[in-house]
Amino acid sequence: MIKNLIFIFVTLFFTACSVKFDIPFSKEPNSELKKEITKVLYLMKKDDLESLNSNYINKDFGFYEFRLDREFNLITEHKFTLEEVDKFIEIFEISSKPVEFDCSFDLDTGYGWKEDGVFVIKNRVNYFDNYKFKDEKEKKFINNILKNGYEVITLSQMIFYMSRFEGKYYIVLIDNVKTDCRKKFEIESKNL
C-alpha cells in the first residue's frame, strides 16, 4: 500500500515537472479596459486634449514618453499633460493579438502596421530598465505600469500604454520608439 502511494506521488511529480506551463503572452483585456480604451480613442479622434488630460492622465504621476534622439539614444520625458495626439485614429473593434510594424525601405508599399485595427496586448516594456526612480511613490507607480500595463496600438503611429492605478485607468506611457525606423534605414543603407 505504501509502495503504491510512493509510486503514485513519484509518477505525479515527474509528470507535473515534464508538463510545460505556458502563460499566454497576450492576456485578453477585460471589458472595462476595452471600454476605457474606446473612450480614449474617441477623445483622441476629437482632439479633446482637455478631457484626455483631466480623465486619463494621473495628476500626481503624469506619464512617460519615450523616443530616440539623433544618435539613437533612448530619451525619457516625464510629462503631466498631453500636448498633442494623433487625431487620425480609426476606431476599430479591439483585438488582443500582437501586430508587427514594417519599417520598409519603400515607404509607399510596405511601411506601417501589417494589419488594420486597434490592438491591445499585455506587454512588458523594457524602457525603464535603467531608469532612476525619484522616490518610492514613483517606483510604485512604475512597477504598476510594468505589472499591469497594456500596450494599445492604433493604425496611426500612436502607441500608448494604459494601466489601472488606484482603481482608475490612466495613460501611463507613450511609445515613440517602436515606430522610429531611422536606425533600421541607416543600417540598411550602409549595406547597399
Image: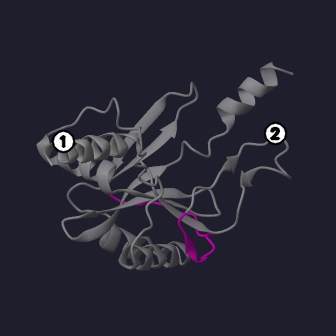
What is the span of residues highlighted in magenta in the rendered image?
Answer: 80-96
Q: Nearer the viewer, mark 2 or mark 1?
A: 1
SS of the residue under disc 2? loop
Count of numbered badges drawn on the protein: 2
Q: Nearer the viewer, residue 44 or 23?
A: 23
Position of 94 relative to 119 (above/below)? below
- Which quarter of the figure is the C terminus placed in? top right
* Residue for point 61% across, 70% down: 89
Return the x and y of residue 175 as percentages of the image width and height: 49, 49
Residue at mark 2 to residue at mark 1: CA–CA distance: 68 Å
* Residue for point 33% across, 46% down: 16
* Residue for point 78% across, 42% down: 104
Return the x and y of residue 99 as percentages of the image width and height: 62, 55
Position of 148 relative to 180 (above/below)? below
Position of 90 relative to 151 (above/below)? below
SS of the residue under disc 1? helix
Residue 138 visible from this viewpoint: no
| 90 drawn magenta | yes
Residue identified by numbered label 2: 105
Residue type indicated by callout 1: Lys
Return the x and y of residue 13 as percentages of the image width and height: 28, 42
Q: Nearer the viewer, residue 10 or 139?
A: 10
**Quarter assignment of residue 34:** bottom left
Position of 93 relative to 163 (above/below)? below
Residue type indicated by callout 2: Phe
First of labels 2, 1 by sequence position: 1
Residue identified by numbered label 1: 3
**Quarter assignment of residue 113:** bottom right
Q: Is residue 188 left or right of residue 142?
A: right
| 77 drawn magenta | no
**Quarter assignment of residue 166:** bottom left
Residue 179 visible from this viewpoint: yes
